[in-house]
Amino acid sequence: MTAKLEALTLGIAPSSLTSGQQLDFNAQVPLNILSMFRSSQANDSIVSGVVVPNLALASMAYRFTIKQDAQQTATLRGDSIFYTPGPPQEDAFIWDGTLDTITLGCSPAHADPYYNPAVDNDEQYVLNFNFYNTDGSYGRLFNGAEFDYTDTDTTVSFNTSATLVAGSAVFASGMVMHAGATIRLQYSSIGVPTTVSAAENTADGTIVKPAAVRPYDIQVYFQTGGGSPVWNLVPGVQSVDATWTATGMEQNWEFGNALAVSIDFVVPAFAGTVTVRPNTVQNLLSILAQTANVSAGHVIGALTSSPIPMACVISSPGPNPTVGSFLKTLYTVDAHFDPPDLSSRVNQKIDLPFAFQSDTGSYYTYNKIMAGLPGS
């Protein structure tokens, strides 16, 4: 429950995050996954694996429930998967602004061949090529004489159709890679011994490493007050379900290419439900007034609703959970709540589901805690 997963989807090294840093899924970049296969459970040596390249974040779902562990689920979309006979490798480096041949990091060992059935079984070695410009733009280059680069088992060469313009590489497809961009290449190499030790599974600076975040480590806040906003802790929360979705996500294809040129989405959406069990009638009326954004004492109807900021703070367990080490904050500036359905039965407690959606689809993760919240 740290902000590590969110940071990875944005191409940010989790260890570089600062307290209060904002993370926005609208700025996501392609994510490449290298899955390592060991020969046995007690063996650190990697013998083979899987490369799943150029993934886009389709949704991120959070679920917090009483008497259950916190859950976070990322759904990613891609177009290919490669099972590698050798350990999967990734070369990541800063591009120097020239179109010189790139030597693979496995050299003098050799990359393993892939016979691409979509291109007459042509032999290729680099399975995926992404670049990430410093201005936030990014692109994907394709293997083949008619595309962007060709390769051997130790090198990558840009095609002659690529030209340098003011220090940037301009490709025939129209993609532009600026000097200083980060390049990431994935391939397989039997000849490169690879080990992954347990020590590499770091917690990115988190001192307490809980097995799971529990409900008492989570606080939900609503902000009310108009010109003098105040954060109010919501009492009686039983569960929070919230999902950010890249609505209209679509892979863009072209003739003659077996891989998607790009993956994009139309608009973001953020929606969910906060379920509350009020312990008094006064608590119920207070929460209703907050979610409707009206003053106490006002009648609330089915159409009484205007958006309010909402935050969910997740802490690491400590001697006093409310002042534990903050892990991250989930925040939306305009949660629009629907008046809850009221259903009561004899011998059952009343749980009220407050369904919400962001009017603008806004959602942000803050590393540790967002400024302005209690404890920040």
Image (spheres, helix red, strand yellow):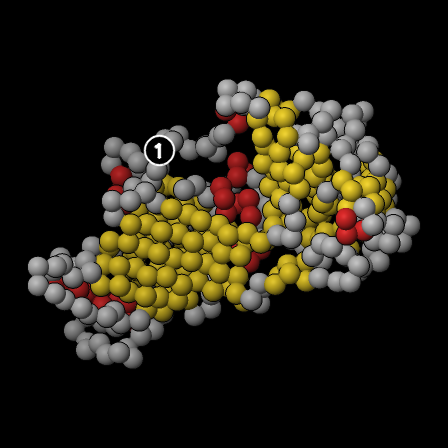
331 on left or right of 255? left
Closest to the observer, 44 or 296: 44
Residue 176: x %, y % from top left: 77, 55
Residue 367's image quarter? top left
Residue at 22%, 68% (x, y): give it. Answer: 288
Residue at 58%, 36% (x, y): give it. Answer: 35
* Label 1: few (<14), some (14–19) or many (≥20) C-alpha neighbours in 10 Å: few
The residue where tag 1 is placed is 210
Closest to the observer, 368 or 354: 354
Closest to the observer, 255 or 2: 255
Residue 283 shows in the view? no
- Dot 1 lies on which element? loop
Residue 11's image quarter? top right
Residue 269: x %, y % from top left: 47, 64
Residue at 38%, 57% (x, y): give it. Answer: 242
Residue 202: x %, y % from top left: 48, 30
Residue 137: x %, y % from top left: 68, 55
